[in-house]
Image (cartoon, grey):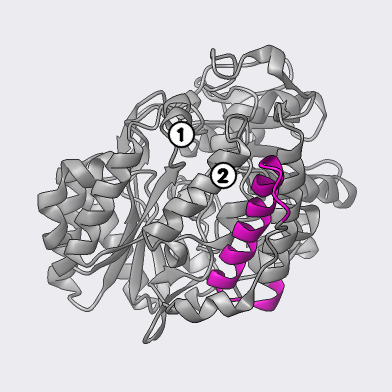
Amino acid sequence: MQRVVLVSTYELGLQPLSIASPAARLIDNGISVDLLDVAIEGLREDILKKADFVGISIPMHTALRLGINVAERIKELNPNTHICFYGLYGSLSGQYLLEKGLADSVIGGEYSYPLINLVKKLSGEKVQDLSGIWTKNNYLSLYLGRPSYIPPARHLLPPLTKYARLITANGMKLVGNVETTRGCAHTCLHCPITPVYSGRLRIVPENVVMEDIRNLVKLGAEHITFIDPDFLNGIRHTLNIVRDMHEEFPALTFDFTTKVEHVIEHQKLFPELKSLGCLFITSAFESFNDEVLGFFKKGHTRKDIELALGILRKTGIDVQATLVFFNPWSSIDVLADCLDFIENNELVYNIEPVQYAIRLLVPKGSSLAGTPQLPMDLLHGDGFNLNWTHPDRRIDKIYNECCSIVEDAARKSEDQLVTFLKIKTLISKYKLKNENEENEGEFDPQVLRSYDKKTLPHLSECWFCCAEPMSEQVLQSSVSSTT
């Protein structure tokens, strides 16, 4: 039987379910497996040298970039090992990985079942079903079946103390991450889930989720982050879970991700969610400009965001908002208006500074590429991404300067209000130049006196997606920022 190692490089500072979940299924099929979380343990060369099969999880772009570095090192250490990239970005970048010789196989979509079959086949067993497994000469369809789920093999991972914490005004808590669904019922054009799942949803059974939560509590978890792309897609399912969780563990708090439109649609449920322990939600606002939101097919408007904010604040649930701050349609005026909206709606502490350094990522296979708003003749690139250039070249200058501000702020653990005001000053300077005014808009620290510093509940590792890394330095340092 193959000596199997599953590798994670980055999963937003949380325990990597993308290796723990398939590991449980492999073990259940009589296959022994080692797990390696490079973000926490580094590159365990002693394990990798002995591996016959290495599966590298790539659930997001940052993990893909880091995973390529890991694959190159594995080939140096152990040239005969079979390297398989699997996960969401396997579907989007598989062809590139295979053609460049970085991977021997690629699996996208639901990956546990294909992984089992691939390992069995490489071990010499007769396997009839190879659906979902891509090789250089054989591109098969995605596997999006409805697999049976079992609790992840968390005992093979580093302890929760090595991962992200919940930060509140009263201190920090250990965090466990759980998934209740996979895929997404929505089809936002810029989202990497859309071209893979195409609006399909996979439900993780309630008994499996609850058993996983029990295991996390035994490991010390005091707060649960539900990592579903949208926790309210299957509202009955998720409500049953948090109700049962609260009954069994009344002290547990939790957070989840959901769309603005779901906050409005299910507003009557939010008081109950608060009573069950919900501290905050993450929501992809992305922009406050209706035209940009329409291009993304987000399903909400600027007024909807204002309505959702009112619902959440009335309920006492905070929001951590995400942005795609830089995109092909955001002019200097749009950027300035975005910051005005944040300030006027008192959202400065609801938005992590890294969000001001987010640039729209367009992977090959993106549902946004080739649409009327982003035609292919505006895109270029021969790697795993399609690159775009803003028609106003000054936007790229602003982007680079914003990245520098955010990177410097991260190094200094700067108050995010200070960072916000620096970004606002920078964009005001460019806006004033447009209007031929003399004021250069220099940052005045005295303005801080008119603001109250807040510590809203949030995770020590911020959530982001659909973004290009700010720099190689940030990309490499991100894997060790949560310890």
Q: Residue at x 65, y 46 (%)?
A: 431
Image location of residue 82, percent across then percent down: 74, 38
Q: Which stretch appears magenta?
A: 411-438
The kind of secondary structure element at disc 1 is loop
* On-image quarter of the C terminus: bottom right
Residue under label 1:
110
Local crowd at mark 2 within 10 Å, few (<14), some, or many (≥20)?
many
Mark linked to residue 335: 2
Locate residue 249 relative to residue 328 in the image: left or right.
left
The kind of secondary structure element at disc 2 is helix
- Front position among marks 1 and 2: 2
**Amino acid on which disc 2 is placed:** Leu
Image location of residue 74, percent across then percent down: 81, 49
Q: Earlier in the sequence, mark 1 or mark 2?
A: 1
Image location of residue 75, percent across then percent down: 85, 45
Q: Residue at x 35, y 30 (%)?
A: 186
